[in-house]
Image (spheres, rainbow, N blue to C red):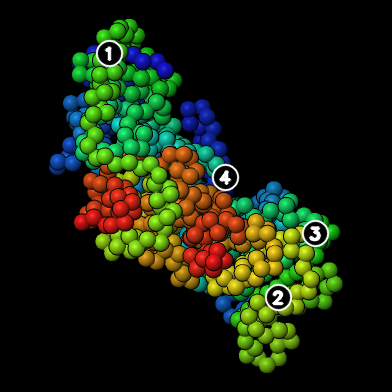
Amino acid sequence: MKKMCVVLDDREVQDNPFQPDMWRIVRKYPLTHDVNFFQARPVDVDLALRWNYLPGQFVMLSVPGEGEAPFCLSSPPSRPGLLEFCIRNVGSLTETLFALKENQTIGIRGPYGNGFPMDKMEGKDIMIVAGGMGAAPLRSLLLDVLDDRDRFGKLTYLHGAKNPGDMLFRDEFFQLREREDLNCLLTVDKDDTGKWPAKVGLITTLFKDLGPIDAKNTFAAVCGPPVMYKFVMEYLVKLGIPKHQILMTLERRMKCGVGKCGHCAIEYLYTCIDGPVFTYWDVLHMKELIGRGVSDKVIA
Amino acid sequence: MMILKMKKEDLSAFLDSIKGWGELWGPTKKEGKTTFAKVDSLSQMDLKATRTIIPPKKFLAPPRFTMFDFDEEGYIERIGDVPKKIIFGIHPCDIHGILILDKLFLENYKDPYYAERREKTLLIGHSCIPDDKCMCYATNTDFIAEGFDLFFTDLKMFYLVWVGSSRGHDLIRMRPDLFSRDLDKNDILTYTEYRKWKNGQYKGGIDFTGMPDVFELGYSSPIWDQLGDKCLSCGQCTMVCPTCNCYNAVDEVELGTAEGTRERFWDSCMFREYSLVAGGHNFREKRADRLRLWYTHKLQAYIGEFGKPACVGCGRCVDTCPVDINVVSVSKALKEQEVGK
């Protein structure tokens, strides 16, 4: 579809940042009972070459007729050409998205947000803590670090799910446990199968198996349900990781992705352009970032 | 800046001469309320009114418009069909409001819909007579030095006309015979008298100094719950606020087809769904949370970022809120730790 070029008083208007490009769903399969994996490639193949992003960035995804919403990317930028999404069916947009079949198209614009500060993280030890759906954005970081492994120090991946059936990318993560260039620790809150081969317990139980940590030299990236932050943050701070090296990626309602529609505002920040990756230092100042209870806990 | 002098009786002829540039809009009285409406001439305007119900943001970020047309193939932007407009009679506070919207919409991911309207709209300011709800003296927005194309200051016997842009100057050039550059001592004295007079018109006594700290200290104050109990979540405060920019966007389908439009319309942070995400989690479930967001944004957060409040002191929230929640009553409640009646 051709974009109209509009001239206003002889000045050409810049590209429309709200314009979605069409992408084709090329793969789609369930990861759990309510989470699907989607792989998409741009209809205009030239776009695939131009499209670059950082782990932790997000896109605005459109299903024509249903609307638009923000989604994090689960693929790493180190594997260009295809975007991967890990999406839970929780609303009307995802409902329609789940009904789409391979070869049908969706609209995508972006990437948006700050993403993880990969340049600052270079040479540092990386600890990734993912709870439940938190694995969706953190898989992008994990794979990006693995794909350029020499750029970083020690890599630790901690992942907790409610039960074995709810663990996203289960096979992929179990394969990672075999690798020697990272420490991949998996746990489930409850093992309802009786056959779970890894840990059972909350994600914090994994901290016991960490071994020695060079805290000052470590960047931690955390994403999970609000209740998880409370305990994980306290642990990471106690461990001695500097607060500005504890990163978390947040979710908010968004209608634009580019700092205009207002919905994701938190004090003077917009989650879409100033985030979605914030440091724990930000959180201590911005009371509404992950909820009052969390920042209180550590101040006290 | 170029400042010209014009006879008061020439205003009508001037407006008639520039109408060819685009539609002429100005403040008009309708059922006792003032609103910006399309007019043919000065005679239909009410230049004495202190404030319109809706600020002129409605011209630049309209209450509702179509962003895209879509079909199975994708989205086609709908842009370029906005008529040219001249808005006459905008007060300094509202121009300050537009400058705040400019920063938001034109910097860092330029919004082409806003940009097109800004480009196709000439803003002609006009001096005002403050009433008891005006607090522009407290927000430092009682005078304006930029953001307009022309600005008319009514000095009873004559107008002083500030020329704020090249396009404003083009309008002057349509009737150069009506303007004079010769300003004498008496003109200057008349202007200083006018400023003195205007400064003496305010009665509110509101002072926003130190509000960022008061907000920080009062974050957990029970005042917010008490205000939340009063608030109706009607969102009128956000609709009438010259700096409120929040919007929603939805796709609307033509029945029985795969075609439709993506519509963009004003949203309000006072609405319950404002911070609701898929799955049902609401980051601001309580009315108190939503009120606090609005007032923190206007009187604390924006000051921290840009050194001035995102309130331009127009008094519309004071005029509009059915339960007396506004920048004045909220600031007072936080300072005195007591919610007034």
Give A135 or B184, whichever is nearer the viewer.
Answer: B184
Q: Are marks 2 and 1 in contact (CB under 8 Å)?
A: no
Q: Are marks 1 and 4 in contact (CB under 8 Å)?
A: no
Residue at mark 3: chain: A
Frontmost residue, B177 versus B236: B236
Q: In front of the other: label 3 or label 1?
A: 1
Q: Which amino acid type corresponds to the residue marked 4 in the rendered image? A: Lys
Query: For mark 2, what is the residue?
Result: A207
Amino acid on which disc 3 is placed? Phe
Q: Tag 2, which chain?
A: A
Q: Is residue A287 above or below residue B206?
A: below
| Residue that mark 1 sits on | B189
**Place of residue A38 in the rendered image (x, y in percent of width and height, measured from the top left):** 63, 67
Q: Nearer the viewer, residue B248 or A208?
A: A208
Task: Tell me how many marks there are.
Answer: 4
Q: Residues within 10 Å of mark 3 (few under 14, many from 20)?
A: some
Please rate how many residues cluster around mark 1, counting C-alpha atoms within 10 Å: few if below 14, some from 14 to 19, many from 20. Answer: few
Q: Do dots 1 and 4 share one subunit?
A: no
The residue tagged 3 is A152
Label 4 Cα crowd, 10 Å radius (few <14 / some 14-19 / many 20+): few
Residue type (three-letter) at the residue carrying disc 1 = Leu
User: Which sits earlier in the primary sequence, circle 2 or circle 4?
Assistant: 4
At 40% from the left edge and 15% from the top edge, which residue is drawn? Answer: B2
Question: Which numbered circle lies on residue B238?
Answer: none
Q: Are marks 2 and 1 on the same chain?
A: no
Which structural element holds mark 3? loop
Q: Which numbered marker is on residue A2? A: 4
How far apart marks 3 and 4 lie (CA) works out to: 43 Å
Amino acid under label 2?
Phe
